[in-house]
Image: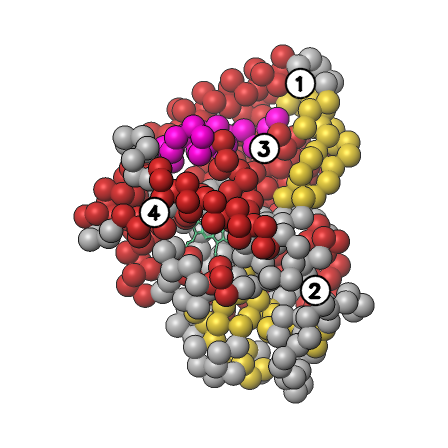
Amino acid sequence: MTHESTLTPTTPDPVGVPAFDVNLHVDEILTNPYPTYAELREAGPVVWLRHYGYYALPRYTEVAETLADWETFTSGEGVGFNDMFNSIRETSLMNEGDFHDQIRQVEGCPIKKGPLEELKPRLAAFTDDLIAELRSKGEGATLDGVADIAMRMPIDVVTDLVGIAEAGRAQFFEWGKAGFDSIGPLDAPRTMPALQTMAGYMQYAEEDFPANIRDGGWADQLFKNGAEAGWDEALCRGVMNDYVYPSIDSTISAIGIGLLLFAQHPDQWDLLRGDRRLLQSAIPEIVRLASPLQFFTRVATRDADIAGTRIPEGSRLIVMYGSANRDERQFPDPDGFDITRNPAQHLGWGRGKHSCLGKPLARLEMITLFNALADHVERFEAGAYRYEPNNIIRSLGELELSIRWAD
Ligand code: HEM
């Protein structure tokens, strides 16, 4: 591979492991990573990326097994690509053991089945209003599938559910994006500015939480449940990150790419319109193909073996959800969009102890939206679109879309 590294590797290549100079954090790979992933998968189950001095796991089986073995491959040393991000401790994402389980329990309260049942009518009403608004633009009008559709429910509803003041809500999307960019390596152009944006967010949080949060919102519950668990305000404020970082952009990515996929595959849209039970497999198929979160890292807590490759204690490994979800060894026709496929074992939500806490919410948002669209939309037609580079999240920045209404 010919992508130039700007870092001099400090560690020699491990013997017998295919080594590459590829930098995954350049725009052309962030926006179109799949040809690179295919080369890495072809090279072996474990590869060495000199640019980072990390091992990488591009195939399905090794990613799934590594995620499941949290004691050998820990998130507790950080899941990112730089020490500043990896030193954050107040998050379920980067803790293990009892404290991880406790954080998940405290922050997970509003995202459980019961509260989500109560949310259903609100999401349904929001979607009806959104569809009325889209129709009011006129038959054949060109919309932006990202700004006009994909962003709407996560930004309008979810930020309100979290319950922070209006000034903060307006910045939620930018914070989410910067949150994911701040996970990248320091030599990637977006990482340092993103770390600075997140420092601004922390300052905002310090001044505003818990003073200016809405009674009964997620943030309010988190501060109350946290206090009951013996946490101080600083810890509650830190754990609030778990609502800010991952709750918006990930879902926007999946919805936006879902719209594009249905526009590109009208046969799949017809299938869904004809049988809504297919939403149960269509949503995971979208998440598999979109893989909004492309990769994180883990650190080996002891000498380990992955598919016959020795991984020394202390090594950092890139777990490549996006590549694993296109592994031809696991998924026949892996780049194909087939909503009748059962991709339940895909890794788009992660696997094991750190699998996505917000999955039930994101799934409910997507099911509500695509179900209502299937009631009213005969065809999506896509024009120009572009992916927005981000150090972790792969999502569309713009998607020209016109809608042919069914009724
Ligand atoms: C389509 C939307 C989403 C996708 C694809 C997604 C994907 C993921 C993935 C891959 C992980 C695993 C991280 C790891 O292996 O270390 C994860 C963890 C997590 N997600 Fe999501 N996510 C989505 C939506 C959400 C939402 C809406 C929320 C919050 C309301 C959320 C909150 C979290 C949290 C807190 C974790 C960390 C869990 C832990 O470490 O125990 N996610 N997500």
Q: Which mark is residue 16?
A: none
Badge 2, how many Cα within 10 Å: few under 14, some, many 20+?
A: many
Which image quadrant: the C terminus?
A: top right
Element under disc 4: helix
Between the C-alphas of marks 2 and 3, the distance is: 30 Å
* In the foreground, 45 or 193: 193
Identify the amino acid type marked 2.
Asn
User: In the picture shown, does residue 370 fall above or below 358?
Assistant: above
Identify the amino acid type marked 1.
Trp
Question: What span is in magenta?
Answer: 148-169
Marks 4 and 1 in Cβ contact (< 8 Å)? no
Q: Which mark is residue 405?
A: 1
Residue 64 visible in this rendered orientation of the protein: no
Give yes or no for residue 27 being in the magenta stretch.
no
Residue placed under numbered mark 3 in the picture: 150
Element under disc 1: strand
Residue placed under numbered mark 4 in the picture: 237
Q: What x and y, as percent, mark residue 338?
A: 65, 45
Between the C-alphas of marks 3 and 4, the distance is: 28 Å
Left or right: residue 339 compared with residue 109 = right
Q: Which mark is residue 23?
A: 2
Q: Earlier in the sequence, mark 4 or mark 2?
A: 2
User: In the picture shown, does residue 281 fall above or below 271?
Assistant: below
* In the foreground, 259 or 105: 105
Q: Earlier in the sequence, mark 4 or mark 1?
A: 4
